[in-house]
Image (cartoon, grey):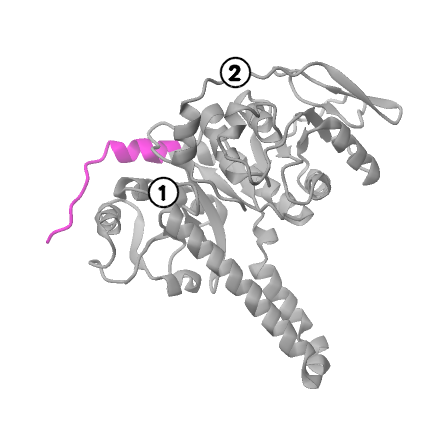
Amino acid sequence: MGQGTFITSLRTVLAVTLKTAQCTHRSVALGSQRIRCEPKGATHGQPLFPTPSVNTPSRMKIALDAVGGDHGPAPCIEGAVQAAKELDVEIILVGDETILKQECERLACHDSRISIRHASQVVEMHESPAAVARKKRDSSIWVGTELVKNGQAEAIVSPGNTGASMVASFFLLGLAKGVERPAIATSLPTLSGEAIMLDVGANVDCTAEHLEQFALMGNEYGKHLLGKPNPRVGLLSIGEEDSKGNEVTKEAFKRLKGSSLNFVGNVEGRDVYSGIADIVVCDGFIGNVALKISEGVAAMIKRLLLKEISGHFLGRLAYPFISGPLQNLKRKIDYAEFGGAPLLGVNGITMICHGRSSAKAIKNAIRRAKGMADSRVPELIQRDIEASHSQPSVELET
């Protein structure tokens, strides 16, 4: 997952005069069908395989940046088909319609719930996030986010440039009332199930108030995702004691202890995966470093384990008996099981996926986006943030 520095990008973009890109009517052949690229403002993409109109309840529509990932559109299309079948949602594939049409033909995609919205540009992983607003307003990330803004989709799911996704969400969706900074919330496996860590890359520098807001947003997301009415909130620090940490974390500790949250205190790095907290709060710099180290350690352990098993006769002999538990372990730590990480604090649902996302990861990201829409998580986050502003702060006794 490529991470961008959110505030730096916004400062750059704020200096730019944004011009609305226009999309012209175009149509391309798909067998005996023709797919029409609609202009901005149209209702939604035309189905790849239209079916006769029937009186069925309206399905939820989710936009998918189908060309922004590292592996091209194939995993996105396959994941979209799986999601459409399992979740009964409509997926709007956003990207170059010629490329998407060819991939759909190759993959034998014949689902009327899959449609295409043309976007002529792609924000590459190496590009500055500012580029999406300055010169790539017909990119798949921008156009997909516009669908959410205009009410034509409930969420945008993207395995593309993370910084570009954040910039597009900030400018098109805007921050929820009272939110000062959005935050990326990722899921982590723990000994007791699953935990949520935020922020993991949107904000390099944060104040104590920002961390308090992250806790409030993570708390509401945790209620939905973890199914816990009162999730335990912890603050990532260098020690369990109240006095440990830098000035920002110590002030954040005071704020969280005086809040209505189920605050369990400081959490050391070694305890993140123990499950002592359901929500782990930190700034984006620490969170991103912690996440990348965790990914590296998990990959190393996997390779070492396979090397030891394959390198010894007894290991190879025992593998048929331990393959089941090993597969269970793989599922628990596989990022594809979690799908994507939402950008919390914006007026809409933006789900950020790993650039190397598989079809399974895309499907599960769509599942999470749908769940957030069903549970009205963005509205609940705004409610909690507004309520926090109306409450007097509580100071710890010294």
Residue 220 seen from this side: yes
Under tag 1, what secondary structure?
helix
Which residue sits at x=78%, y=31%? 101
Q: Which residues are magenta?
A: 382-398
Residue drawn 33% across the image and 29% down it: 178
Which quadrant of the structure image shows residue 264? bottom left
Residue 66 position in % (x across, y down): 67, 36
Q: Is residue 205 left or right of residue 159?
A: left
**Residue 56, horizontal then vertical, whole percent:** 71, 26
Q: Is residue 175 left or right of residue 338?
A: left
Check residue 214 in the rendering and tell me which mark sits there, or answer none: 1
**Residue 118 spot, x, y in % from top left:** 69, 24
**Residue occupying image coordinates x 52% and y 16%:** 19
Number of marks present in the image shown: 2
Residue 3: which numbered mark, if any?
none
Q: Does the magenta-highlighted stretch encompass residue 388? A: yes
Point out residue 250 in the picture as x, y percentages from the top left corner. Answer: 22, 52
Name the residue tied to disc 2. Answer: 19
- Picture quadrant of residue 306: bottom right
* Residue in front for this viewpoint, 44 or 28: 28
| CB atoms of marks 1 and 2 within 8 Å | no
Query: Looking at the image, which residue sits at the far right?
Result: 32
Q: What type is the residue that disc 2 sits on?
A: Lys
Q: Nearer the viewer, mark 1 or mark 2?
A: 2
Give the farthest residue toward the left.
398
Tell me how far mark 1 sits from mark 2, CA to CA.
Answer: 32 Å
Frontmost residue, 271 versus 54: 271
**Amino acid type at mark 1:** Phe
* Other residues around mark 2 within 10 Å, as few (<14) / some (14–19) / many (≥20): few
